[in-house]
Amino acid sequence: MNKDCAASIISQIYHWIAFSCRRQPPESGRASLIISIDVDVGSAEIGERNGGSNDRNVHPFLAESIVGRIEEQVVPLLLRAFDEMELPVTFALRGQLTEVENSIINLILESGTGHEIAAHGYSHRAFTTLSEIEAEGELTMISTGMKKFGIAPKSFVFPRNKVSYLPLLEKHNYVSFRGYGDFLRDGMYVKKCGNLFDVHPSLYLEFYDLSLSRKIINVAERNASPLHLWFHSWNLGHPLEVAERRIAKALIPLIKHARKKEKRGTLKFETMLSLAEKYKHARAIATK
């Protein structure tokens, strides 16, 4: 067992125990399962355009162009798997993808499954390193670029999970965001922040052995809580055969486990936006 695999298993064990011990009242009559996928580059062309100047904002070891090349191969595999299982997920895309011909944006839009396209910054720079003017500029460029594809993103996933400038998200009509999580801060909840909803991260997936993650789904079902799983598309690895194997041997069995609960009526699959809209609607009714 390599170091990364051991770390993944330890993380799953910790989260299972921690979530099992946190007794919180059910937020609804059934659990929700949300899957969000960060596409940090999405195209080798973007990395090549940036000429290495943005590499460290994306990955500690790999060049931005290499990450983009991996994601160009992996995202279609993920789409095929999700579409075959009729499972809508949230794809968090970086705004620069709107500048690329034949980008994966078109592949997602062509899917009939109803995937959500969320924003993941424009240039994948941490918002905590940006001035307010720079952050405003990124959000404006996202809106302008996405509009060319008929998209008005309503969910935001902060690059490198560095949460900042929430009032600017409100100004640009976002509804939800994924808050900051780690071993101690992960949770199974949705929290209102101003006029936004933090669809909080529950578990970061790494694709070695996800069998313990099924126990975490069981906890969410028992507590009727939202469980938000997330990962980077490059987490599936390369070459292509590695990504195919991890999807087939780890991701799909996990989804099938959750699908059984959906058939029992104890769990529902959601996107970040669809779940946030439900919370927004419930609060509006409660305040009448």
Image (cartoon, rainbow, N blue to C red):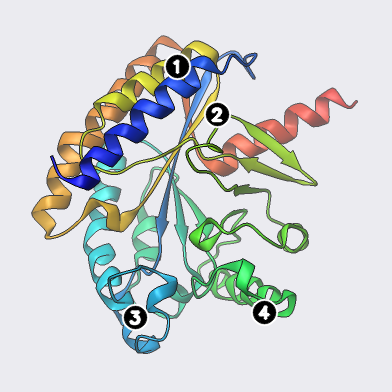
The answer for how far apart the CA atoms under marks 1 and 3 are is 40 Å
Q: Point out the tag, 2 or 3, that comes first from the N-terminus.
A: 3
The residue positioned 38% from the left and 56% from the top of the image is 108
Q: Nearer the viewer, residue 6 or 116?
A: 6
Residue that label 1 marks = 219
Query: Can residue 203 be seen here?
Result: yes
Q: Which amino acid type corresponds to the residue marked 3 in the rendered image?
A: Gly
Looking at the image, is mark 1 or mark 3 earlier in the sequence?
Answer: 3
From the image, tell me which residue sits under label 2: 188
Residue 43 to residue 247: above or below = below
- Is residue 86 visible to the viewer in this orientation of the structure? no
Dots 2 and 1: beta carbons under 8 Å?
Answer: yes
Observer-side mark, 1 or 3, equals 1
Compute the Cα span from label 2 to label 3: 35 Å
Residue at the image position 53 percent from the left and 56 percent from the top: 161
Judge from the rendering whether residue 171 lies leftward or rightward of residue 70; answer left or right: right
Q: Which mark is residue 134?
A: 4
Disc 1 or 4, which lies upstream in sequence?
4
Residue sitting at x 40%, y 75%: 56
Mark 3 or mark 4: which comes first in sequence?
Answer: 3
Q: Quadrant of residue 223?
A: top right
Task: Say few, some or many: other residues with alpha carbon within 10 Å of mark 1 (under 14 / 14 to 19 / 20 or more).
Answer: many
